[in-house]
Every structure is written in C-alpha cells, then in structure tokens.
Image: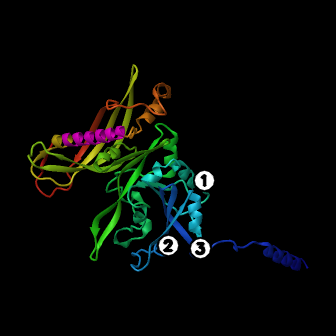
C-alpha cells in the first residue's frame, strides 16, 4: 500500500514539473555580434550584424559559399523605433547576450543623444558591460561586412577581439561600456574611443580583400564629441596608456647619413606626477621601455640607439598632446592624476571637471630605455656598449 501511495505521489509531482517548454532552441535564434549607429537628417540609422554560428566552432575556415553575417538596416526617430522596425523583418528570436561591439559614426557621436544611446544598451537586460565601443568616419555597413583574412570566423575579427594582436602591436587600448561610463563620470570626463578604418592593403589570388584597422581615437566627453586624433598624430596614446603596450619607433641614425632604424618597444610602465607650484599645475611623465633591434647594418652603439628612441618617443607624446589641445581635450587624462593624487588641490584648479591645460602643462617627459636587445646574432657583433 505504501508503495502505491509513493508511486501516485511521484507521478503527481512529475505532472506538475514545468519542463523546458518555454526555452528557445539555439538553432532557432539569431545572434547579434555588432551594432552600428548613425544619425542623419534627424533620424537614427541602425545596422544590426547577425552572425552565423554554424561556422564559429569549426577549426577550419568557413565554407566560402556560406554567408558569415547578415546586416539589417532600419531608420527611426528614436533608436528603439528603428530596432522595432527591423524586428518586423526578422523571423526568429534575437539573442543579444553575445553582442561584442558597438560602432558609432561621427554624426552619431556629434548628436545630442549619444549619451542616451549608450545608456540604452547598458539598461538592456541581455547586454553586458564588456561590449566594446568604436567610432569611424567610414560607411558603417562597409565595416560590418568586412570578414577576417583567410575567411576566418567573423567572431575572430579585429572588432570582436582586438587583443588578439596585442603581441604584435598595441596602438589603441580597447574601451568597453564599463570603462567608457567610468571615464565619462570621473575627471576629466573624457574618453578616447578607438577609431576604425578599412585597410585595403591585402589581396588574395582572386581579388583584393579588406580588413579593419584601429588607427587613432575619437575624443568623446560628457558634453559631446570633440574630434579625432588619427594615424601618426595619435602615436603618443600607446605610450601613455596605463597597460603595457608594444609598438615601434623609427628614427634617423646620427652616425649614418641616410640610414634609418626601426626599433620594437615594449612599454614597461608609465608614471604621471602632478607638480603644484603657487597657482600653477604642471605634469611630469616617466616612461620606461625595453627595446629590441631586429634589423640593422654597420656598427652602432647602444647609446645612439637609446638617444634615438628617447627622441622619437618624446616627439610622439608631445605631438599627440598638442593635437588634443587643439580639440580642447585632455587626451592623456592628466586631470585624473591630480584628482587621484590630491583632490583638494584638484578642486582648487578644476574648471568644468578638469584642469585647464596649456602647451606648457606637460612640462617634462622622461624616457628610460632599460635594455637594448640586439636579437638573434647571425653575424659579428655590431652593437657597442
């Protein structure tokens, strides 16, 4: 009797279980990887990049005939209206949890609602704070349609995973939504958003190919967009960012009339010291490197190499700083260093949340080269200590 009662109770409990009836099957969903935002003629233009996950888990390259991504497009008076218009042409559920990046056009950053766009993605229950942010002057659709070299999975693209190439070069530090909000809310209330271009220097056996590249920064503040610092003018950013960076400098050798030398640099540390004297604030910068020499000819001394590196790095840092001043931007966030070091002094000097800067505010740049590594030796030693 007891066994019958236990069996009846068990069957009753099983009938009350909800099961998985309300769960969407993975193959019946679309997965958003990137979103592009533009703003023209008073309307938002949104681009939704949906990726094909059938190719993601494969070790080999995706089949050439298989589309890696589809780009949806819609307009609206608000961003939400544009998304709902796009939903009308979608035949499966859209999953936002795998979204990796957000791409702004110049016009979108210049619009007065740029902050609200960022806030909308932060408030969405399926998105994450780790979503990366970028800006561009290229057509957004063209960037979203770029696939990685050798037809690798689109989830391995430069925009989805910018740190894949950090061992080659760290030109611009990625910025996710979490860091973007922190930097907008704290002095100097500005953030450097990586600037994206399309690189057309590649081609395969059939046709030229394209790849995205990070070639500068766009300076965005809580009061609006300030402008771009691009290409060689932005090189100082990589030496002043907080994390370790790898890059190169090229300089003319003193001992050679026409010879130039390119040196690989590994940035070890960057230290910014606010110096307060009377009614003036200046900043001193200390940067330390290790250097690797990969190719040179003739005899050259390590002192000459150090001299060339120091001169080139100082020039990069100063040039980028001056480009920032043209935009009324604290591109190295010097104000934050005083804020962290001495908040009372910061309150005394700050105006609109940051320290007023001039060309003389960056008073001293100290560059130290700890080691000069000549690389693998194939010929006679040609670097003199």
List the residue tagged with mark 1. 123
- Image quadrant where residue 319 sits: top left
Rendered image: mark on residue 53: 2
Say which of marks 1 and 2 sits in front: 1
Q: Secondary structure at mark 1?
A: helix
Does the segment drawn in magenta span residue 321?
A: yes
**Earlier residue among tags 1 and 2:** 2
Question: Where in the figure is residue 338, as x and y percent of width and height?
Answer: 44, 31
Looking at this view, is 11 or 353 the one in front? 353
Q: Would you call the spot at circle 2 few (<14 residues within 10 Å), some (14-19), or many (20 or more)? A: some
List the residue tagged with mark 3. 92
Residue at (47, 25) in percent of width and height: 345
Q: Secondary structure at mark 2?
A: loop
- Image quadrant where residue 30 sits: bottom right
Q: Is residue 349 left or right of residue 298?
A: right
Identify the image quadrant of the C terminus. Answer: top left
Does the segment drawn in magenta span residue 129?
A: no
Residue at (82, 77) in percent of width and height: 11
Question: Alpha-carbon distance for marks 1 and 2?
Answer: 26 Å
Q: Is residue 285 visible?
A: yes
Say which of marks 3 and 2 sits in front: 3
Q: Which residues are magenta?
A: 307-326
């Amino acid at each position: 009797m007891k066994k019958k009662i236990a069996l009846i109770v068990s069957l009753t409990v099983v009938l009350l279980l909800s099961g998985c009836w309300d769960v969407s099957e993975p193959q019946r969903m679309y997965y958003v990887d990137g979103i592009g935002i533009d703003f023209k003629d008073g309307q938002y233009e949104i681009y939704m990049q949906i990726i094909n996950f059938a190719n993601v888990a494969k070790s080999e390259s995706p089949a050439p005939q298989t589309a890696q991504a589809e780009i949806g497009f819609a307009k609206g008076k608000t961003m939400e209206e544009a998304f709902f218009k796009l939903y009308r042409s979608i035949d499966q559920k859209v999953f936002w949890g795998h979204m990796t990046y957000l791409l702004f056009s110049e016009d979108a950053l210049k619009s007065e609602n740029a902050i609200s766009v960022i806030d909308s993605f932060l408030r969405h229950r399926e998105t994450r704070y780790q979503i990366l942010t970028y800006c561009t002057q290229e057509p957004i659709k063209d960037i979203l349609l770029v696939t990685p070299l050798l037809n690798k999975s689109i989830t391995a693209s430069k925009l989805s995973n910018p740190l894949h190439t950090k061992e080659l070069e760290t030109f611009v530090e990625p910025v996710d939504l979490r860091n973007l909000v922190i930097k907008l809310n704290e002095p100097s209330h500005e953030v450097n958003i990586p600037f994206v271009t399309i690189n057309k220097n590649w081609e395969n056996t059939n046709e030229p190919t394209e790849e995205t590249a990070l070639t500068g920064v766009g300076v965005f503040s809580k009061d609006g967009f300030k402008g771009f610092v691009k290409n060689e003018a932005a090189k100082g950013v990589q030496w002043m960012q907080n994390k370790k960076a790898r890059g190169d400098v090229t300089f003319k050798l003193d001992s050679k009339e026409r010879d130039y030398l390119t040196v690989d640099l590994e940035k070890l540390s960057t230290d910014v010291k606010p110096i307060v004297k009377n009614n003036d604030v200046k900043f001193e910068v200390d940067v330390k490197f290790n250097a690797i020499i990969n190719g040179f000819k003739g005899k050259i001394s390590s002192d000459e190499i150090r001299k060339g590196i120091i001169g080139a790095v100082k020039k990069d840092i100063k040039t980028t700083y001056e480009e920032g001043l043209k935009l009324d931007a604290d591109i190295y966030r010097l104000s934050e260093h005083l804020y962290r070091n001495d908040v009372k002094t910061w309150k005394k000097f700050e105006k609109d949340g940051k320290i007023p800067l001039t060309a003389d505010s960056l008073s001293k740049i100290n560059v130290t080269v700890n080691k000069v590594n000549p690389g693998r030796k194939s010929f006679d030693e040609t670097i003199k200590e």
